[in-house]
Image: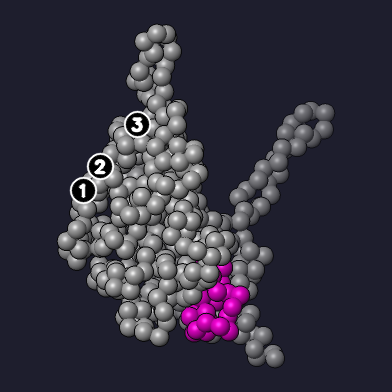
Amino acid sequence: QMMSIAIRSGSNGIHRKISNAVKRMINFKRGHPHPSLLPHAELTSTLLDLCHTSDTDSEAPSTVCLPGLDYGDPGGNAATRAVLAAFLSEAMRDDDSSLCSGQVSMPISPDRLFLTTGVSHGLDLLCSVLTQPGDVVWIERPTYYLAADIFRHHRLRLHPLPMHAGGRGIDVHRLVNDTNRPPPTLLYLIPSHHNPLGYVLDAEDRAKIARWAGERGVILVADEVYHLLDGDGEGTRPARMAAFDPNCCVSVSGLTKVCAPGIRTGWIEGSPCIMESLQAYGYLCSQGGCAPFGNAIVEHALQRGAIQRHWQHLRGAYRRRARLLHTALRPLETMADFSLPLGGYFMWVRFRHPAVQDTEQLRIWCEQKYDVTFLPGIDCDPFSKEQDKYELSVGCEIRSSFRLCFAYLDEEDITKGAQRLVAAVANFIKKEEKNDVNS
Ligand SMILES: Cc1ncc(COP(=O)(O)O)c(C=O)c1O
């Protein structure tokens, strides 16, 4: 970035501009949307419209009665759940449900939705009503590292799921044939556009894992925050996990990624039994649902199509960014594995080159010398502090990988940042090889 400094020179008051080349850090680490991708315009008009269309108080006609200002139902007001269920049913209408169980709930029933303030809240609620301290959760490695913290705060014990080498996700064959370990209480998965690996669990594997969970009495908690954020529309999206077996699979999702993080509206879709446990949860009964007023705004935004329009806009924007990133990183193909993300926020880059065994070292180099940064793989490993305990090979692969987020940067920075990464990696390898020769 060129920074210009205006200097008043002498008494004639003429301004002289001195241009300083100041490089700005390009940040591939941050898993947020770019500020220009927040739905300011859509939500402003929704709010104005909500004020205009709200009922007027019959006793004081000049007073607007906004919806959602009273206590609500613990699981979210019925009207909001109905509008949300209609949106989700329409959005997932073409999902591949060929391998789903006979009881697939399509259209999605509002009675099977419990409103939360987002996916993290949904995970925390499920831990509260379904687990006891000391229970075991099986979790992918790598995974969304903050989810691991939610489980640990409930004093749950984490064990790694078997993973394929090469960042190809969970090894379902090994999982369903593993008879050595007693089954866990919960199994936590990110089946759609995984954070950080970017992969999508296919319908066959979803069906197998749901069957296994049903047979072993395991509750499968699917974090589907990126489910609707598919970019390229290539092939059909596998159905959400709750459709495979609603008795043992729970889908946890929200508007965080398809609309805006601050909107803090999410949902849990699960069996009547899980809905009942959540609805009886003390603090939600006491406070009357999570956020009735926020939910009323979301309900109105959905009715006006505002969220749907923004969702489509984001899909296009992220698709372009993912493609730009993939193209600009091509020079790394000789030394690393990565593929074009078909949705979500992330690309996972795994180095084959022996000089890049520790991307934390590479990160320091990139930040200090090239003003570009990313998330080292090790930061996505919930077992990074217990290395000797669990399958070293997966741990090694994570260490030689990094995660790039393409949602936070604009298109210009994506290309510029990727070019900096390519140059940084090339020179890092040269440096490492020189060090080897000298030592
Ligand atoms: C896999 C995954 N789950 C959950 C979240 C957080 O979701 P929320 O903001 O709705 O709590 C994120 C955010 O990055 C995520 O990547």
Query: SS class of the residue under badge 2?
Result: helix
**Foreground pick, 408 / 162:** 162
Whether residue 241 appears in magenta in the rendering, the answer is no
Question: Which residue matches tag 3?
Answer: 300
Amino acid type of disc 2? Ala
Q: Position of residue 102 (x, y in %)?
A: 17, 61
Which quarter of the picture shows residue 57?
top left
Q: Are marks 1 and 2 in contact (CB under 8 Å)?
A: yes
Query: In the image, which residues are magenta?
Result: 375-403
- Classify 271 as above or below 432: above
Residue 434 visible at all: yes
- Please tell me the numbered disc located at residue 369: none
**Foreground pick, 151 / 224:** 151
Position of 70 with respect to 92 (left or right) is right
Query: SS class of the residue under badge 3?
Result: helix
Question: Which residue matches tag 1?
Answer: 107
Position of 126 with respect to 233 (left or right) is right
Query: SS class of the residue under badge 1?
Result: loop
Residue 401 visible at all: no
| Earlier-in-chain disc, 1 versus 2 | 2
Amino acid type of disc 3? His
Quadrant of the image containing the C terminus: bottom right
**Foreground pick, 210 / 203:** 210
Mark 3 to mark 2 CA distance (whole Å): 13 Å
The CB of the residue at mark 3 lies under 8 Å from ligand 1: no
| Earlier-in-chain disc, 3 versus 2 | 2
Q: Are marks 3 and 1 in contact (CB under 8 Å)?
A: no
